[in-house]
Amino acid sequence: PEHRPLFGRHVLITAGPTREPIDPVRYIANRSSGKQGFAIAAAAAAAGARVTLVAGPVFLETPHGVDRIDVESAREMAAAVKGNLPADVAIMVAAVSDWRSKDVSGEKIKKRGSAPPALMLTENPDILATTAAGGNRPSLLIGFAAETQDVVENAKTKLKRKGVDWIVANDVSGDVMGGENNRVQIVTKRGVESLQNMPKDDVARELIARVAEELETSAER
Ligand code: C5P
């Protein structure tokens, strides 16, 4: 039916930042409100999908009809994603921390002496690339790319490097972070579609409409 085009589909979405502990009181995180990912989850549910939303720490209400799994770190997010496949569509909107502290102190690190402590970092798993390469790959796998320059060029590179179907590139050089509006470009193997600057809810609906269309046409093929 036209108004519930994703009925019978499972859509898996990641949203928000991750939080990587340094000690019991400190962490490394990304500047992400989770608003865009939550809006996409809401739009997918409104389109009739079964939606699993894997969320980092954010201050947002769970959209109606969405199954939400709260996580903190990138590794927890990776495990939750893996554990909730298969999905027809996965949309990875989370701003995952690229690194975490190599050693997590069990006690609060004290200010002592004159030298500040050195923070050693280690790489986090790339959830999107791992999902692309793993078993149970969703037939439509979509990543986001926050860029401040060469937005489309970087998105095209990322599309290939990560082995995903679409990259939604957003220019975060303005006040997108935490803001209500977003301006995105949808980069696929076929080309680039630039959407206007619009509220994140509208970006979400536009994206979900294209997802539904893609699933429909790929089913016809
Ligand atoms: O490489 P970059 O971080 O710009 O890629 C962004 C995309 O990759 C987003 O879709 C983000 O959710 C995903 N990502 C991920 N795991 C990481 C880093 C990024 O899933 N460790």
Image: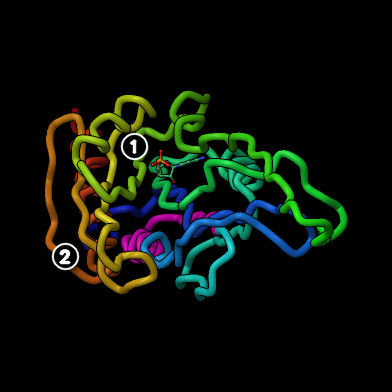
Disc 2 marks which residue?
A: 197
Give the mark nearer the N terminus: 1 vs 2.
Answer: 1
Judged from the image, the secondary structure of the residue bearing numbered disc 1 is strand
Q: Is residue 220 left or right of residue 31?
A: left
Q: Is residue 194 left or right of residue 156?
A: left
Q: Residue at x 27, y 50 (%)?
A: 148
Q: Nearer the viewer, residue 206 or 114?
A: 114
Q: Quadrant of the N terminus?
A: bottom left
Residue 79 to residue 60: above or below: above
**Amino acid type, residue under disc 1 in the picture:** Leu
Q: Tell me the number on the disc at residue 41.
A: none
Badge 2: few (under 14), some or many (20 or more) residues near its Cα, within 10 Å?
A: few
Q: Nearer the viewer, residue 27 or 190?
A: 27
Q: Position of residue 217 (x, y in %)?
A: 18, 37
Q: Residue at x 42, y 64 (%)?
A: 38
Residue 140 to residue 44: above or below: above
Q: Is residue 156 left or right of residue 114?
A: left
Q: Write down the region rendered in magenta.
A: 39-55
Dividing the picture into quadrants, the one containing residue 114 is bottom right
**Amino acid type, residue under disc 2 in the picture:** Asn
Badge 1: few (under 14), some or many (20 or more) residues near its Cα, within 10 Å?
A: some
Disc 1 marks which residue?
A: 140
